[in-house]
Image (cartoon, grey):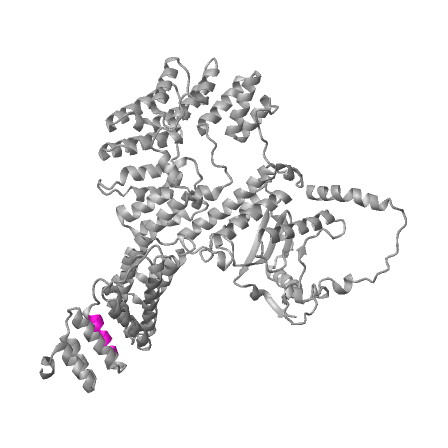
Amino acid sequence: MNFLKKVTLQVLPKAEAHLSLGNNSAIHTSSVCCRVQSGRYRITVKRDRPLTYEMANPPHFIGHRKSWNSWNTSTLKDALRPSQTAIEDVFIRKFITGTWHALVCSEIIIKRQHNTIRIAAIIRQAIAQRKMYFLIGYTEELLSYWMQCPVTLEFQTVADKKDVVFKYI
Amino acid sequence: MYLSRQLRQLPRSRLTRHIASGNGTHYTTAARPAAEHIEIPKRIERSPTDLLQALASTVGRDSTAPHYKYHDDPFLIPMSNIAKRTYALSKEAGRKAANWIKEEHRELFMHQEAQPPIEKFAPSMVYTEESEVDASSLQLLISQGEVTDAVLVYNLLEQKGIEVTDALKQSLLELVCFYNNQEPLPEEYIEERWFMQNNRRRERHGKTWKDGELAEKLYAAIEPKTPQSYAALIRGMAKYLQCERAYALLQEANEKRIQLDTNTYNAIIQIVSFIKDTAELRWQMCTSLLNQMAEQQLQPNLGTLNAVLECISTFGNFKLARSSALKVLPEFKQLGVTPSLGSYYYLLIIFCRERAPVSHVIIDILNDIAGKEFKVEHPKDTFFFATAMDVCRNHLHDKALAKRVDDLLHTGNNYDLIGDSFKEGIYYRNYLALLCQTESIEDFMQFYDMLVPNIYIPEPGIMEEILRAIEINGAVEHVPRIWSDMVIFDHTHRESLLLYVLRIMVDNRPNPELPAQQQLPKQCAKVAMDMYNKIEESVKRIKKVSFTGQMLGDILTLLVRDNSSFDQAVEVFNYIDKQQHRIPGTPADSALFEYIEATVLNKSPSQALLALQYAVENNMETSALAKRIHEGFTLSEVHLAKLKSLVGEGFINK
């Protein structure tokens, strides 16, 4: 994947320089925050931060109240391309939020089955239908050029952004 | 559970049978299959897509859902013919844009993910003046059907003085002749093909062959001339209607005793109608060409049959056309040529003409081909269904035949032969129009529910036919449903349709005693009010509909028939009253009378007097109105004085 290649090309010399500073591994002394912070939202003073259902449920509810955002088998034992899949998923998410600018109002769910990729999201009805169809055709085609496999969009639309708000905190 | 129960019974049954058989033959249930000879069938060779095709054959077109090319979301489902076209083409435009980006930023798309690599996902090769090319790249381009690139590479090879073999020149000549040295529409853009109809018909009219261009140069470069090079050039010229020169080339080839093939003769027979003017001359030339084929011992094929039939179909003299078609058919049957749907299409246009006696040839055709599955074999095969339905409707007016044609269309994969959106539209237009004229209204509405709106959306003309059927049957209960469809399909700016809907509702006063019609006055009033609002809104639009007095009178009548919408009726009447100088015509007398009846019921004498004043000012019949007002109300002094001032005192004494 040349996206990855380009990233590594830029990053690699820096990382090497960093490593060569001294081969002594430092002790990480700051507290581990990721487990209490990631995927959680802080309550605002005015209690006016809108959360979707997904956002309202912290990560430990995955598999109980909400589901995974990426569906694939790359992390099973002896499975293929785990890292490529993860990077590709990041790319797809960035591509879609950028192409459907200010229109996506949910998480982007990526499902891989055999050689196809199905992408689901909730879209705001802020542009005309024919523009949406243009973007659907464009996204499907360009992503399939990039990933070199059939890509299907399974978007749903909502009339208003507030329709996906589960609660305010 | 079931199994264990059976097992318990097994010994017992064996026992009984043993006793019953008496003579002691020891056969059991288990022993019997062993006696049968099992024959293992031979392995059947499957293609990679056979499994998919088997799976696909289990699902048909779902008439309750839109076509699968549209996105499955209520917001994105197309609701009118224009929307269907726009959405599908927009999606394809998006795909084209992505393709453009891939070609423009080719350096970003050079990676290879798929194993084995898929060519279509990679940017295509670009050939420029500086490219390193050889004969093999030309070969590759020709096999891929890339016309412009192949021509470019050929020119490069010529400049560099690289020898191109005659075989390669021949295949390039064939490519150039087939496409007339023009890049065809790429195969993957199916929607553009599906919705493109007008361009293709225009193509048929004039010569589009490029004289003196690459094809002829290539032909000149091939020495000595082979039969194949003659064939390629003749077929190319015939396809793009350079008729005279194509025929001249054929004669030249014959003089040089060059053996041509069947398809080349087919191409010439197809353009006979462009070379000769009258039917007799055309038929003469046709037969002479066929005789030439026979001399050269060329076996005619389906293309020959269709070409001859096409030539016959251009005869103005229908008697000659019919008789020659009847001569041709048995001969080709003897030769073992099975006609395709295209041949039947030609038969239909030969036999079923507007200015010729009625022919029932379609019945014989359907007897012949009902229940058969067809594959596309000839370009004209896709014309059959639209024409057959047209014959059923306009020529024979036969519902049963139309249904047989429809059955044939839905047999196997025959729906693939419907052609494009234009022909599909014609097919369903004729089908629906025929059904609404011949079926009872209840049966027709069943068909309507099945076809509309996902498979077919009626055009305004067909909507009018449907409304006519409703009017004839007096089935006013279907009007609200049809009206809501008309709103969705965007037919509300057609004045004739609006008037028709109103007339049906006004003329068929709902009978409140029938349970099916109890809700109707209310629904009709809703439709009327909806229409009133739509017309008022339309002032801002480009396609304006303007009120007429007749229209407003009908709306008024419908509103007063529903007791709960009297206020809206008053609003509409005030509109009529205030705008009376702008609105052409006046409401019908009956409309005003019904309005005054309603004012009596709702006890508002001032409204009644306003209506009377309107009638007086517009020179309408007033005495009945005045009488009704006088009898219906106990009028106050002021009202009575007004009444007198409007119509005089005469009526009170009657």
Q: Residue at coordinates 22% horizontally, 67% vertically from top-left?
A: B587
| Quadrant in which residue B159 is drawn | top right
Is residue B169 in sight in this rendering? yes
Q: Nearer the viewer, residue B400 or B569?
A: B569
Residue appearing at x 58%, y 65% in the figure: A164
Q: Residue at x 36, y 50 (%)?
A: B428
Going by the image, does B130 lie left or right of B501?
right
Q: Which residue is rendered at x = 36% and y = 41% of the image? A: B384
Q: In the rendered image of this protein, does residue B114 appear above or below residue B240?
A: below
Direction from residue B593 to residue B365 in the image, left or right: right
Residue B218 sits above or below residue B178 on the image: above
Q: Position of residue B161 (x, y in %)?
A: 57, 15
Q: Is residue B141 above or below residue A119?
A: above
Location of residue B212 with respect to B508 vertically, above or below? above
Segment tinted magenta in the rendering: B590-598
Q: Position of residue B441 (x, y in %)?
A: 31, 61
**Residue B645 appears at what percent x and percent y?**
14, 79
Depth check, front residue: B25 or B203: B203
Q: Horizontal placement of A161 versus B629: left or right? A: right
